[in-house]
Image (cartoon, grey):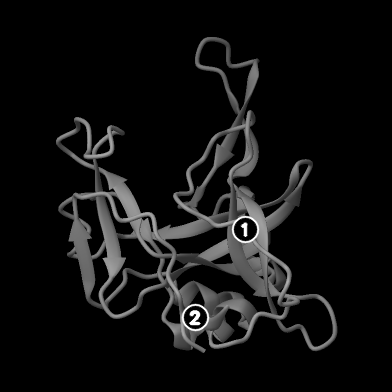
């Protein structure tokens, strides 16, 4: 919240569980992550809430198309899809998703230094915390979010040619959360700022932001 330029609105003794690496786990175990959105109360201040990463949907089984399988979609790539269109059109269903690093599978494969599948990690050079353009909606399991993706910039494309997350500049937060559909769509573009790239797994420490 301080990275958004605001003091947290919750009581000093309220504790959010520390958040480390967030990854989708499907229907077995919900993996929760923090998002920032407009509150529906009063003058609609910003609030931070924990949501499950991944919109639930059903897809046909490859073996038997008549059988529907549960799937949790974490990235909003085709914004013309009915899965995302409703949330994108309604400003109250937009959110911003904080991150320190994001990862893409390493094209050479193999194992990384943490014993997990090898990845290439990306961060913003001039911000300790960055923010993805996110969408959320209520589901049978609670509120869930996904972040929007766009075409990769020149920095990410050599490692992931299909897409990259849509990263918001701090000056665009209000437009994303409150703007019209056209104004919000204009923000979904490749990130133009400086970035950091590394193969080593980032440290698992928390980042403190001075007020």
User: Horizontal placement of 14 versus 67: left or right?
Assistant: right
Q: At x 73% / y 76%, what residue is drawn?
A: 10
Residue 20 in the image: state x and y as whole percent: 47, 53
Residue 133: x and y in percent read 50, 67
Residue that appears at 53% across and 55% down: 19
* Rendered view: 5 above or below 70: below
Give whichever of 68, 6 is nearer the camera.
Answer: 6
Q: Looking at the picture, does residue 40 appear above or below residue 137?
A: below
**Residue 157, label in figure:** none
User: Where on the picture, by quarter, is residue 87?
Assistant: bottom right
Of 203 and 81, nearer the camera is 203
Q: Position of residue 194 (x, y in %)?
A: 22, 76
Residue on which the image places disc 2: 3
- Bin the neighbour count of mark 2 within 10 Å (Cα to Cα): few under 14, some 14-19, many 20 and up: some
Quadrant of the snapshot with the N terminus: bottom right
| Residue 193 left/right relative to 54 | left
Task: From the image, tell me which residue sits under label 1.
Answer: 85
Residue 163 vs residue 160: left or right?
right
The CA span between labels 2 and 1 is: 28 Å
Give the side of residue 47 with respect to residue 78, left or right: right
Quick check: can you spot residue 170? yes
Q: Is residue 8 above or below residue 28?
A: below
Q: Nearer the viewer, mark 2 or mark 1?
A: 2
Residue 105 place in picture, x, y as percent: 27, 41
Check the image and name the residue furthest to the top: 63
Give the mark nearest the N terminus, 2 or 1.
2
Residue at x 54%, y 35% (from the top left corner): 25
Q: Residue at x 19, y 56 (%)?
A: 198
Outermost residue to the front: 13
Instruction: Answer yes or no: is residue 163 visible.
Output: no
Q: Secondary structure at mark 1?
A: helix
Characterize the local packing of mark 1: few (<14), some (14-19) or many (20 or more) Cα atoms within 10 angstroms.
some
């Amino acid at each position: 919240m301080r990275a958004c330029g605001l003091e947290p609105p919750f009581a000093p003794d309220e504790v959010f569980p520390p958040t480390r690496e967030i990854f989708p786990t499907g229907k077995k175990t919900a993996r929760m992550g923090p998002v920032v959105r407009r509150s529906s109360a009063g003058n609609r201040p910003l609030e931070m809430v924990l949501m499950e990463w991944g919109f639930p949907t059903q897809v046909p089984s490859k073996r038997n198309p008549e059988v529907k399988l549960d799937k949790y979609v974490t990235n909003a790539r085709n914004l013309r899809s009915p899965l995302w269109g409703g949330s994108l059109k309604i400003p109250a269903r937009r959110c911003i998703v904080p991150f320190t690093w994001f990862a893409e599978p390493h094209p050479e494969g193999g194992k990384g230094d943490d014993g997990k599948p090898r990845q290439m990690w990306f961060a913003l050079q001039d911000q300790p915390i960055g923010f993805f353009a996110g969408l959320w909606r209520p589901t049978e399991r609670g509120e869930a979010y996904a972040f929007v993706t766009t075409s990769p910039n020149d920095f990410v494309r050599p490692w992931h040619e299909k897409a990259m997350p849509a990263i918001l500049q701090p000056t665009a937060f209000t437009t994303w959360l409150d703007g019209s559909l056209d104004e919000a769509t204009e923000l979904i573009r490749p990130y133009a700022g400086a970035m950091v790239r590394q193969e080593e797994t980032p440290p698992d420490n928390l980042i403190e932001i001075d007020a």
